[in-house]
Image (cartoon, helix red, strand yellow):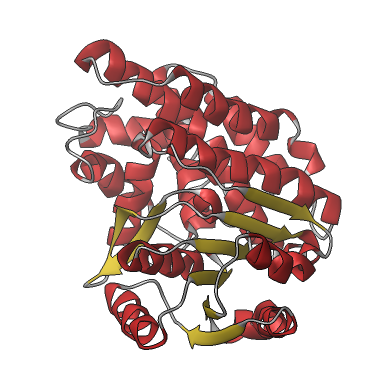
Amino acid sequence: MVFPRVVLAGHGVISRLGEVCREFAFHKEILIITGSRTRQICGDDAVEILKKSGMSPEVAVCNSATREEVDAVVEKARGINPSLIVGVGGGSKIDIAKVSASRLNIPFISVPTSAAHDGISSPRASIKEDGVPYSIEAVMPIAIIADTSILVKAPHRFLAAGCADVIANTTAVLDWELASRLHNEPFSTSAATIARFSAETLISHADAIKPGVEESVWFAIKQIIISGISMSIAGSSRPASGSEHMFAHMLERIAPNRSLHGEQCGVGAIMMMYLHGGDWKRIRDALLRIGAPTTAKELGVTKAQVIQALVHAHEIRPDRYTILGVKGLSEDAAERVVTVTGVCEK
């Protein structure tokens, strides 16, 4: 198990980036991964902070998280031989940073500018290849610096999506328990407990997640970070990724770029909890209070696309047993799921 050695979450903590780097005794060459917008938000600030700390930072401005972007970053890194990669940005920039660091066998620091999913603290990354997203093993951040004064400036939609991603742990853990009972799959009580705790905390305190309130960001980001760490404890994404994530990934393939990953997982969790026979209305109501989507319309997709994603979701990870079973849902079953839960209109 590998955990972040430093986790800073609070107002203005970006100023401690240089201090953290000195604490780990990294040599001067550091590569910062950021985007064009996130560079303006705090990427340039990170450069100046590191320079004042005696470092020699280089910047790689990236676009979406693709195999080609990772290859370009790795090539650039080999030219400057950095001791560390710092990912400054949203989920895609953090994913590029952690995969690049993994390939280069060097550590990375996560500096999120939005909190749209628990990838800011997990050893997994979503990378697209030929336009199709794949979840792959990467590297755990050695440190996480989550500055709430920066995160609160992102649209509330991103924070709501991050909360939805964590709330979806409720069905991921149920799937994992099911696989353990039916297929004797290895199960970690510690990882499952932590993943479930982070989800339940957000569900129970959904009213505390409000737009434009820094205290809300501080409260939510802790649970998002904890959720990511549960995957390191498990040695896999099992505690935070089950049938609801399969649905999300399949929906993204069928109707790409219509909604955020966390938003898709939240809607997926409503339907998967129904299949588990659990209290799906509790999940739906928590998402509503947080401001996350609960319907296909809010995801920007059609009923037919949601049904298609449900029917084929089990194909995403055929090695991972979930409530969807080996053969998946029939169209009739999928139709019933979406109508009973209100995800789609009759």
Name which quarter of the figure residue 96 lies in: bottom left
Residue drawn at x 32%, y 36% is: 335
Residue 291 is situated, as x and y percent measured from the top left of the image, at 68, 49
* Residue at 50 percent of width and 70 percent of height: 84
Please tell me in which quadrant of the rendered image residue 199 appears. top right
Is residue 34 shown to the viewer in this render?
no
Residue displayed at 32% across by 43% down: 246
Give coordinates of residue 117: x percent, y percent.
54, 52
Picture coordinates of residue 264, whole percent (x, y): 46, 50
State whether residue 232 is above or below residue 35.
above
How many numbered dots are placed on residues in this image? 0
Give the quarter of the figure containing the N terminus: top left
Of residue 38 and residue 250, the one placed in the foreground of this image is 38
The C terminus lies in quadrant:
top left
In the image, is 186 to the left or to the right of 203?
Answer: left
Against 28, is 344 above or below?
A: above
Name the foreground residue: 170 vs 60: 60
Q: Residue furthest top?
A: 181
State the residue in front, 181 or 3: 3
- The residue that appears at 43% across and 16% down in the rendered structure is 277
Q: Can you give x and y, in whole percent of width and height, for residue 136 in the image?
A: 30, 54
- The answer to whether residue 145 shows anywhere in this view is yes
Could you say which quadrant of the image residue 152 lies in? bottom right
